[in-house]
Amino acid sequence: MVESPLQTGYVKHAPGFVENEGPKLITSRFKHTDSFTLDKYLSTGGYEGLRSSLNRLPNQVHDEVREASLLGRGGAGFPAGIKWGFPPEGVWPRYLVVNGDESEIGTYKDRLLMERDPHQLIEGVLIACYALGLSQAFLYVRGEMALAQERIALALDEAYKAGYIGKNILGTKFSVDIVMHWGAGAYIVGEETALIESLEGKRGMPRLKPPYFPAAIGLYGKPTIVNNVETLSNLPWILNNGASAYKGFGSESSPGTRMFAISGHVKRPGVYEVEHGVTTFRELFYDDNFCRGIRDDNELKMFIPGGGSAPWFFQEQLDLPLEASAVGAAGSMLGSGAMVVMDETTDAVKACLSVVRFFARESCGKCSPCREGTTWEEKILQRILDGDGRPSDIDLLLDIGDNISPGPYPAAAFSDEGLDAVPFPPSQTTICPLGPSSVAPIVSAIRRFRNEFEALITRRDPIPLSLKVEEVVT
Amino acid sequence: MGFFNEENEEIAKEIVSRYPVARSALIPLLHLAQEQEGWITKPAMEQIAELTDTTSVEVLGTGTFYEMFKFHPVGKYLIKVCTNISCQLLGADELFEHVKTVLDIEEGGTTEDGLFTFEEAECVAACTEAPCFTVNYRYFHRASPELFDEVVVDLKAGESPLSKGCADDQGVMPEHGTLSRVRQQIPKTRSAGIKHPEEIKGPPSWIEEVV
Ligand SMILES: Cc1cc2nc3c(=O)[nH]c(=O)nc-3n(C[C@H](O)[C@H](O)[C@H](O)COP(=O)(O)O)c2cc1C
Ligand code: SF4
Ligand code: FES
């Protein structure tokens, strides 16, 4: 198991969170054991962003958020201030739905924000409701996150009693209800239109597009803003300190900080709050202030830069900054802020199967390229690993991928082979991006490690389950 | 009528009242039913249908989409081992095999004494704390086979293992079906007022008074 200097003591605070050097805009309370209580929140500047908002007009608050260029943290990186401008004129009621369904492989940050600082999230929701002119918001927490539900329910109760939520908030006319909703286990519900279907009490299947944004037609057919937990958790800080202070962190196109979860074969895996846009992957994986290198000082083989849906990166991409456009041009995405680091002992084909299997299991089944395609991808990869692979299987995998996502699939440059980067995002024949996501590990792995696939296909006995490569080559 | 006990029927009605449209309460009510009975029974679905203005077929249709709802009895403790990539990289497959051996059941099975059900989990957002498993959706981080054994010993002895894993979570280990041990309660006097969307024609009245 991984050596971590924090192994024994740190779980008393936030398990997984690493308190390192650097600005802490949204994780500043994580170090306190009672960070989730109203008392602690109030004694550390809590609800000041709300007070400051209520002293301004709603559109001034909206302007401040637009000015801050706060990018969505749920995966797509869409600017929140611009999305908030989408509801069509004169259509009421409108709703805010908070996306707390975090379930993309490798992703771990929203759970921490909900468990450790629920009041910060609630304050963010209140600020958004004020700016948007709403009177009801829903906080959708992933079904499996029992402790997060508990902390949010407690925080909502405290905040209602203390007059921060409900009728006439802080003695003003502003009135809004926040209701906690909880899911029941389905990754696809994280997709915003599926989230809305689920909140309507239906099967969580994505809706046909257009409309592309539920801001036009959302919950109960009404304009609905869906924002991620981390996105909203930034609002108290922004309203407290102002957009220009916020832009003092990070880069011009990606201001502020972001929470990144770095898992896998690093010496100090964890969730870090990192300055957006300026830090590089190399710094994150190797610096003493972050993950401190690859375990056993092994070589890095590959890494997933932004959740299971992201095409893989390799050593050549280590010096890219954590910035959406740079990563996109290089063939992948920062997505949900989840990085999975794999060292030289990792078997590329097994890693590929692992990610594909997730998408195959989580496909909602609404469109056939995804439903059938992901199932086939899993079957073929499994038979290759079982020692039953056929020489045509590599092309077959790529062909299935091409049915789900036609044309060149996003991928990192591979200079040894003279291959240029194919920029993100992929095309799709499906209703939502889940289907195309299953192609990411396949194209990434085959492009880079075709020899590993070929070696397995010519081998005739099954390979043991574990992802470790040593057991395979002996 | 008649599945929910008196207390839960009150809670169910209170949950329905928080939503502009009753059907939105369907998933929370399925959870409530699972909390009462440990799994979802036919009478439960019938009463949920009445409460949410749907049919029991719609309740079943929605419910079966979601992996957490069980339509057959399961163990008192649902053990789930994450087998996704971050956990696999640090030994999830070995942990999975260990759990299978210790409980002596296949994935999806329940032990004869009705104490444990064992399932694979998809990423539970604890990837940096790999490998991990959950018991009734309570987390155990950086789990070794020894940690799992200790948890089983505790559960068999009727003791709470919660502080052994993620020390952030404390107290009694609830039985399968209970998620949050706290329920949100919106005091009637504090609610801003929840209305059906068709009853709302314009912006909330507070806007005019603020602007
Ligand atoms: C398959 C799929 C799963 C998703 N899962 C999540 C999720 O778990 N949490 C989340 O916030 N966004 C998720 N998203 C993105 C949402 O659709 C949506 O873009 C996001 O919640 C918007 O919030 P933001 O603008 O604040 O980022 C997912 C998207 C897709 C296609
Ligand atoms: S792409 Fe897959 S998950 Fe998305 S709507 Fe189609 S079948 Fe469902
Ligand atoms: S991969 Fe196991 S918790 Fe995320």
Image (spheres, rainbow, N blue to C red):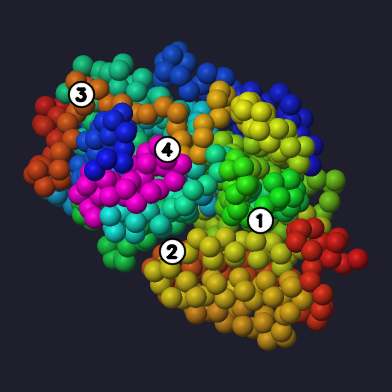
Horizontal side of A438 relative to B22 (left or right) equals right
Q: Are marks 4 and 3 on the same chain?
A: yes
**Which residue is found at the position 70% from the left and 32% from the top?**
B153
Q: Are marks 4 and 1 on the same chain?
A: yes
Q: CA distance from mark 4 to mark 1?
A: 25 Å
**Which residue is found at the position 28% from the left and 66% from the top?**
A210
Q: Earlier in the sequence, mark 4 or mark 1?
A: 4
Q: Are marks 1 and 2 on the same chain?
A: no
Q: CA distance from mark 1 to mark 2?
A: 26 Å
Q: Earlier in the sequence, mark 3 or mark 1?
A: 1
Chain ID at mark 4: B
Which secondary structure lies at badge 1? loop
Residue A62, picture quadrant: top left
Measured from the top left, where is residue A128 in percent x and y? 31, 36
- State whether residue B179 is above or below residue A464: above
**Which residue is found at the position 11% from the left and 27% from the top?**
B209
Q: Is mark 2 within 8 Å of ligand 2?
A: yes
**Which residue is found at the position 44% from the left and 14% from the top?**
A39
Q: What's the residue type where badge 2 is placed?
A: Cys
Measured from the top left, where is residue A68 in percent x and y? 39, 38
Q: Marks 1 and 2: which is nearer the front?
A: 1
**Quadrant containing the N terminus of chain B in the rendered view:** top left
Q: Nearer the viewer, residue B32 or A334?
A: B32
Horizontal side of A193 relative to B133 (left or right) equals left
Disc 2 crowd rating (10 Å Cα; few below 14, some 14-19, many 20+) is: many
- Name the residue that disc number 2 marks: A364
Q: Nearer the viewer, residue B85 or A406?
A: B85
Q: What's the residue type where badge 3 is placed?
A: Lys
- State whether residue B181 is above or below residue A405: above
- What stretch of residues is rendered in magenta? B27-55
Whether residue A278 is visible here, answered yes or no, is no
Which secondary structure lies at badge 4? helix
